Image (tube, helix red, strand yellow):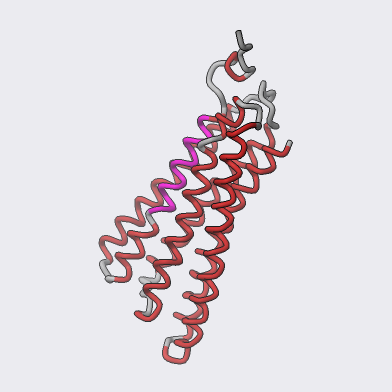
Amino acid sequence: MASPTIASLFGRSPIKPIQEHMEIVCECVSLLIPFLDALMKEEWESANGVGKNVVKLEKSADKRKMSIRKHLPMSLFLPVNRGDLLELLTTQDRLANRSRDITGLMWGRRMTIPEPMQEKTREYIESAVESSKRALEAIAELDELLSTGFSGMELKRVNDILDLLDKAEHNNDKQQIRLRGTLFKLEKDLPPVDVMFLYQIIDKIGGLADTAQQVGSRLRLLMAK
C-alpha cells in the first residue's frame, strides 16, 4: 500500500487558495477584451460597467491575497518554501493590479483608439489575455505537481504549458513592436497628449503579458528546488 503524501496528512492544502486567487485574477484580466470593445465603439456606459467589474475583481483578489498571507502557516509540511509561495502570490496579484490600471487610465481619459490601430490593439490585448490564461493553466496543476513530487509526466505537462506561456509572451512582444510602428505613422495627425497616453497603454498591456510570464518563472523556480 502506498504511503500517503505529507500534504494529505494536514487538512486543507495552502495551494488551493493560491489557485483560486489566480482564477479571480485571470477573470479580471479577461475583462480587458470587452472593455476595449466598448471603448472602440464609444459605448461609454458599457465600458464603465466593465471597468467597475475589473475594480471589483481586483479588490476581491487583493482580499484573497491578504487572507492567504495571514493564514499561510509559518512552517509548511510541503516540499516548497513559504516565501516562494508568497512571491508567487504577489506576482499573480500584479496581473489584477495592472488590469485595473489599464481600465482606469483608459476610462478616466475616455480614450479612443484610432481606427488604423483598432484591429492590432485588440489582437495585442488578446495575446496578453492568452498569456494570463496559460499562467492560470499552469498554476492549476500546482497541487498535482506537489502530489507527484515535481516529477514524471505531470512535470512534463507543466513545462509544456509554461513553454506555451513563453511563446504567448513572445508573440505579445512582436505585436507591441507592430502596434508601436502603426502609432508612429499616425503621430503627426493626432494630439500630442493622446499620442503620449496611447504609448503608455501599449506599455501597460505589454507589462501585463510580462507579468504573466513572471508567474510562470516563479513556478519554474518552485519546480527546480
Using the rendered image of the protein, determine whether residue 212 is visible from the camera's viewpoint.
Answer: no
> Which of 4 and 99 lies nearest the eye of the viewer?
4
> Which of 136 and 186 lies nearest the eye of the viewer?
136
Image position, residue 97 (x, y; %): 51, 53
Using the rendered image of the protein, determine whether residue 152 is visible from the camera's viewpoint.
Answer: yes
Q: Magenta residues: mostly which secondary structure?
A: helix
- Any magenta on residue 23? yes
Image position, residue 58 (x, y; %): 45, 47
Outermost residue toward the right in this view:
225
Q: Give the vertical position of 221 relative to 30 (above or below).
A: above
Q: Give the vertical position of 83 relative to 128 (above or below).
A: above
The magenta span reads: 16-30
Q: Give the vertical position of 82 relative to 200 (above or below).
A: above
Image position, residue 89 (x, y; %): 58, 41
Q: Residue at x 65, y 32 (%)?
A: 150
Image position, residue 213 (x, y; %): 59, 53
> Which of 160 and 76 lies nearest the eye of the viewer?
160
Outermost residue toward the top in this view:
1
Q: Give the vertical position of 107 relative to 51 (above or below).
A: below
Q: Residue at x 32, y 65 (%)?
A: 37
**Relative horizontal placement of residue 154, taking residue 61 as reference (left or right):** right
Q: Quadrant of residue 46?
A: bottom left
Q: Quadrant of residue 74?
A: top right
Question: Quick one: quadrant of the N terminus?
Answer: top right
**Relative horizontal placement of residue 55, taking residue 223 as reference (left or right):** left
Q: Residue at x 54, y 42 (%)?
A: 138
